[in-house]
């Protein structure tokens, strides 16, 4: 039951991928799609505002941190269901980074934040890089429990940013992406909390 539940969360992560992007990519596969092989989202034409631009600029580095943690968990997590979820996160968020990058470039906008907004985002929404480095030095059950705790907090921040974008953004495609992120990360958090509380020895 536990593995099935996390598999559903993995499927929720992959819900943003079109059929052509997910074909042949099992969440437990060790050779998941790369940025070069994943198709881009449709273009994001139409009206946009500063909230749309800043959402993408904030989420790209945020996603890259989640990918970094997921890459570790693909091989270091103790339980197969956690490794499966890590695979799905790596697939989905690699795809989303490529998509968001494409949109910003199409809009002729910078890929990164600057000034006060950048500092505030790093302080309040991103995981400290030193903590990720510490995670990489852990093994076994300690790694898995720390990974789950860190990623739960990290994905909560993604949910908050997505809901803010959905409320304030103007571009239809960006708001739709934010809604999908809200749904998939909420499912991930719920199942990771259950995984953290699984009986010892199971």
Image (tube, rainbow, N blue to C red):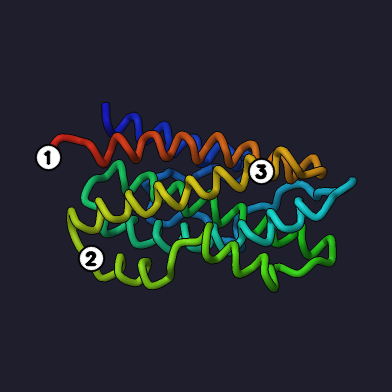
Residue at the image point whose x is 55% and y is 57% from the top:
94
Residue at the image point whose x is 78% and y is 65% from the top:
105
Q: Give the quarter of the image for residue 139.
A: bottom left
Percent position of residue 51, x then y: 76, 51
Residue 81, placed above or below residue 62? above
Name the quadrant of the N terminus: top left
Q: CA distance from mark 1 to mark 3?
A: 38 Å
Q: Give the quarter of the image for residue 107.
A: bottom right
**Is the C-beta separation of discs 1 and 3 under 8 Å?**
no
**Is the C-beta separation of discs 2 and 3 under 8 Å?**
no
Q: CA distance from mark 1 to mark 2?
A: 19 Å
Percent position of residue 161, x then y: 61, 48
Q: Which residue is mark 1?
A: 200
Dot 2 lies on which element? loop
Q: 10 Å neighbourhood of mark 2: few (<14), some, or many (≥20)?
A: some
Residue 144, placed above or below residue 139? above
Please state if 134 lies on the left or on the right of 68 as rendered: left
Dot 1 lies on which element? loop
- Depth order, front residue of 76/170: 170
Q: Which residue is mark 3?
A: 164
- Depth order, front residue of 27/195: 195
Residue at the image point whose x is 26% and y is 45% from the top:
80
Q: Earlier in the sequence, mark 1 or mark 2?
A: 2
Please state if 75 lies on the left or on the right of 162 as rendered: left
């Amino acid at each position: 039951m536990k593995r099935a539940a996390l598999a559903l969360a993995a499927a929720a992560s992959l819900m943003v991928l079109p059929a052509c992007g997910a074909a042949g990519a099992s969440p437990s596969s060790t050779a998941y799609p790369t940025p070069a092989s994943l198709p881009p989202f449709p273009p994001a034409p139409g009206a946009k505002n500063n909230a749309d631009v800043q959402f993408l600029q904030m989420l790209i580095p945020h996603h890259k941190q989640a990918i970094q943690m997921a890459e570790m968990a693909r091989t270091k997590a103790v339980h197969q269901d956690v490794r499966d979820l890590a695979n799905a996160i790596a697939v989905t968020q690699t795809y989303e980074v490529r998509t968001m990058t494409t949109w910003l470039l199409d809009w002729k906008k910078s890929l990164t934040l600057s000034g006060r907004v950048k500092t505030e985002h790093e302080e309040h929404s991103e995981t400290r890089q030193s903590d990720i480095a510490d995670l990489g030095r852990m093994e076994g059950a300690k790694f898995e429990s720390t990974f789950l705790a860190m990623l739960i907090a990290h994905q909560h921040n993604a949910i908050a940013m997505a809901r803010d974008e959905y409320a304030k953004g103007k571009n239809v495609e960006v708001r739709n992406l934010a809604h999908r992120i809200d749904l998939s990360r909420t499912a991930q958090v719920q199942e990771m909390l259950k995984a953290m509380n699984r009986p010892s020895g199971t």
